[in-house]
Amino acid sequence: MTVKITAQHEKFIDAANIVFPGQVEFSTAQVRKIVSETGCPTPSWLLKPEYRVGHGTYSLELAGVATAEVIDLPVGNPSVGTVGVLQSDVIVIPESVKEYVPFGHFRDLKKILVSRLFFPVFITGLSGNGKTMMVEQVCARLKRECYRVNVTVETDEDDMIGSNTLVDGNIVFREGPVLKAMRKGAVLLIDEIDLASNKIMCLQSILEGSGYLNKKTGEYITPAKGFTIIATANTKGKGSDDGRFIGTNILNEAFLERFSITMEQEYPSNAIEKKILFKEFERLEIPGMEDYINCLVTWADVIRKSFFEGAIDELISTRRLVHISQAFSMFKDKMKAIELCVSRFDTETKATFLDLYTKIDAEPIEEELKAAEVKSEDLDPIAFDDFDKPDTDEKAF
């Protein structure tokens, strides 16, 4: 969500930064103090019931604006200008998905974010079970800003904290997502953290909930209330023994120890998964798919049980079931939708998955037979007879 800050907003934000630097929540007494000491107009746009976060306390985040500041760099380099700390006119609240079905640790995560305590959370689970989406949808429902960072082995301190860059002949420090989240009391979502190298050890002190000394500017940044860190991963930071998640790394033990809790995200129950697919088909405006949904969920459940028993090496994720639903909306063919979505697996696994589905749902086989009959009826039988007749118009060569 992006909100444009007006001149009226800016006056109060600038004044608030002078009296209460970096603060995003204000009591009525604090608002009166800001107005009396700076002479800015009373922010009637902020003092509304919908922006209240406590008794007589109002939030700039809920109002759709946030504080910002610009800091001068140390004197000594004539080519150095100012530090662009934060683009305050952009609010990064994830978009709410009305079809989203909460499950797993959704309520637990919501309680953590409502508390506004610094409480780092590590979420682990197999691919495609909704870890990242859960975090984003909790933030969306609470109207909390969320800075998402997708980690790779190349992610380093400059990507996370920020770096100097040349703008109009001046060296300008551009803050990274970590410092932005700290200043605004936002949620920092580090996605696929187990792909990272030791370059993210720059977060060590930040994971303790303390401030951060920016080596490039000499500024010490103290996190605003509400700032916290949530990391997602396919492993527990110990690498992937079975080779399923190639590229994941063994994370530093001291680094992992700084996460307060670990949530193990499982795939949703059959009932929840049916609800997820029902809402997806509803979004795609395809009614009457209850039987297909039941078969898909049963099929995925059998495959997962076989996987955990060691009978097969692959499984069907909730995300893949949603992809099958979307493929069906375009092709209107059950087996084609499934086949296209499982073609990424090796030939033997793909054949096993398709065969298993036909044992659960016999309807696609009947549809294929009917389609074959229609095609044979459309063919001109005379055309076949012509192949059997001798060529009476032979030419000499």
Image (cartoon, helix red, strand yellow):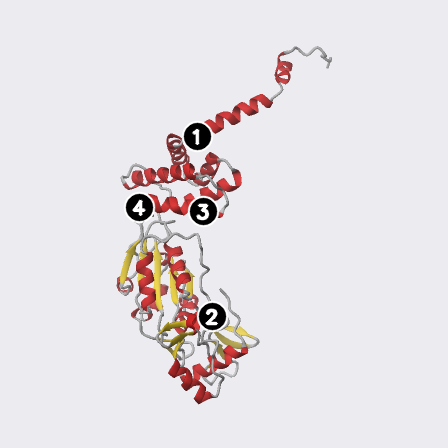
Tag of residue 320: none
Q: Residues within 10 Å of mark 1 (few under 14, many from 20)?
A: some
Q: Are marks 3 and 2 in contact (CB under 8 Å)?
A: no
Q: Which residue has dot 3 on it? A: 280
Horizontal arrangement in the rendering, residue 386 relative to residue 332 (left or right): right
Residue 299: x and y in percent read: 36, 37
Q: Which residue has dot 2 on it? A: 64
The mark nearer the N terminus, 3 or 1, is: 3
- Residue at 41% across, 53% down: 100
Q: Amino acid at mark 2?
A: Gly
Q: Which residue has dot 1 on it? A: 363
- Residue at 42% across, 61% down: 140
Horizontal arrangement in the rendering, residue 78 relative to residue 277 (left or right): right
Q: State the separation of the CA atoms marked 3 and 1.
A: 21 Å
Q: State the separation of the CA atoms marked 3 and 2.
A: 30 Å
Q: Are marks 3 and 1 in contact (CB under 8 Å)?
A: no
